């Protein structure tokens, strides 16, 4: 089952983005470098149409560089997409944004024709931090939880560069359940909308498979392999980190909190939860599931036709008998 979270203000934000997109020269899409594809909003891709996009893979210090390079190579060659690893606390990265934007929109950038850029992205990827870094002052509220920004702001970076901030929005239905859990693991979904233990177990299964040594080192685990049960490992983590109830019983909810906090802050080490090949495979599974669901729906309709015909025949026979009685 996919994790879903789509508060009412997000629907309002979608409408506002749609309205102003015609005034935008470029979209600066802030992504979470740990989930380069899952942190893309397909709704935004649809809304921007042919508008070029600068993808900033934020939180690069938390990301596995080897996997990050796979994504940069994956997008290379698309003239409407420019992607760069990024950190809002790296002044050199922030200074390069004007250069990257000008590269994508060479026909604008003067006081008379400033570049109009929209900053967009899902919750908790660092949009507000980027705005504050670009402007050199605190103009946007920053929080360590999603949905801090709830209204649009239009501000001038330089005479030739304007930015429009937008609220972080997810989309009404996340079709890929694996992607939805990756969003929850990394903190894009408000914690009140998730089951901590459920999400932690998904995250732990990933680390056991892809970053086992980092996991073992962080928690000083023994006799743990890629095939170990995530529940058992989470229980060990809880006991080592003091997530205990009275009587020494492990508090699994608290254990999940400890683990997810370590994942989100990078305490276990740099990681990326997806690769282009993995996403292609998951998209194939999603399409197959949708096709199977549609086939089942059509089969159900087809099976119902004879039943409806039988009912129609019975109604016709009843009317015919009634007419005969009336004639008698």
Image: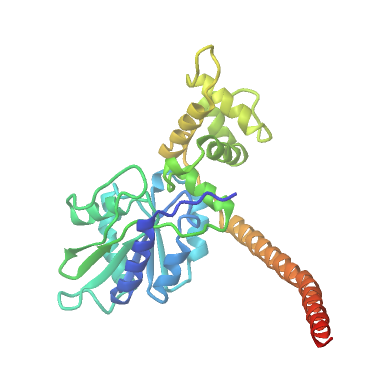
Task: Mark yes or no: residue 218 visible.
Answer: no
Q: Quadrant of the C terminus?
A: bottom right
Q: How is the image coloured?
A: rainbow
* Depth check, front residue: 4 or 46: 4
Q: Residue at x 47, y 36 (%)?
A: 260
Q: Quadrant of residue 102?
A: bottom left
Q: Residue at x 17, y 65 (%)?
A: 158
Q: Residue at x 47, y 71 (%)?
A: 78
* Depth check, front residue: 248 or 303: 303
Where residue 91 sits in the image (x, y, percent)? 26, 50
Q: Quadrant of residue 266?
A: top left
Q: Compared with residue 259, is residue 271 higher up or lower down, i.e. above or below? A: below
* Depth check, front residue: 298 or 76: 298
Q: Compared with residue 1, is residue 296 higher up or lower down, i.e. above or below? A: below
Q: Residue at x 24, y 77 (%)?
A: 108
Where residue 107 sits in the image (x, y, percent)? 27, 79
Where residue 139 sits in the image (x, y, percent)? 19, 53
Task: Mark yes or no: residue 50 visible.
Answer: yes
Q: Compared with residue 192, is residue 93 higher up or lower down, i.e. above or below? A: below
Left or right: 126 as drawn, with respect to 112: right
Where residue 210 sits in the image (x, y, percent)? 59, 42
């Amino acid at each position: 089952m996919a994790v879903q979270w789509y508060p009412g203000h997000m629907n309002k934000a979608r409408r506002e983005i749609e309205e102003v997109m015609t005034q935008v020269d470029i979209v600066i899409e802030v992504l979470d470098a740990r989930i380069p594809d899952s942190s893309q909003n397909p709704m935004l891709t649809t809304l921007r149409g042919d508008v070029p996009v600068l993808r900033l893979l934020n939180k690069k210090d938390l990301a596995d560089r080897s996997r990050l390079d796979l994504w940069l190579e994956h997008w290379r060659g698309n003239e409407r997409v420019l992607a760069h690893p990024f950190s809002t606390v790296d002044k050199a990265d922030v200074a390069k944004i004007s250069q990257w934007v000008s590269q994508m929109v060479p026909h604008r950038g003067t006081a008379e024709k400033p570049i109009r850029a929209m900053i967009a992205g899902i919750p908790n990827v660092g949009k507000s931090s980027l705005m504050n870094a670009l402007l050199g002052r605190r103009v946007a509220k920053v929080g360590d939880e999603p949905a801090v920004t709830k209204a649009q702001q239009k501000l001038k970076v330089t005479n030739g560069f304007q930015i429009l901030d937008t609220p972080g929005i997810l989309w009404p239905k996340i079709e890929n359940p694996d992607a939805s859990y990756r969003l929850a693991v990394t903190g894009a979904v408000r914690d009140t909308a998730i089951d901590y233990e459920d999400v932690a177990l998904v995250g732990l299964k990933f680390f056991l498979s892809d970053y086992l040594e980092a996991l073992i080192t962080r928690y000083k685990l023994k006799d743990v392999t890629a095939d170990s049960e995530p529940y058992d490992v989470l229980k060990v983590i809880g006991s080592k980190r003091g997530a205990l109830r009275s009587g020494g019983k492990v508090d699994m909810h608290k254990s999940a909190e400890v683990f997810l906090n370590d994942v989100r802050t990078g305490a276990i080490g740099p990681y990326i939860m997806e690769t282009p090949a993995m996403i292609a495979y998951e998209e194939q599974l999603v399409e197959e599931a949708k096709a199977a669901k549609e086939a089942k729906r059509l089969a159900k309709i087809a099976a119902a036709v004879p039943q409806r015909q039988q009912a129609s025949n019975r109604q016709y026979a009843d009317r015919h008998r009634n007419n005969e009685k009336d004639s008698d």
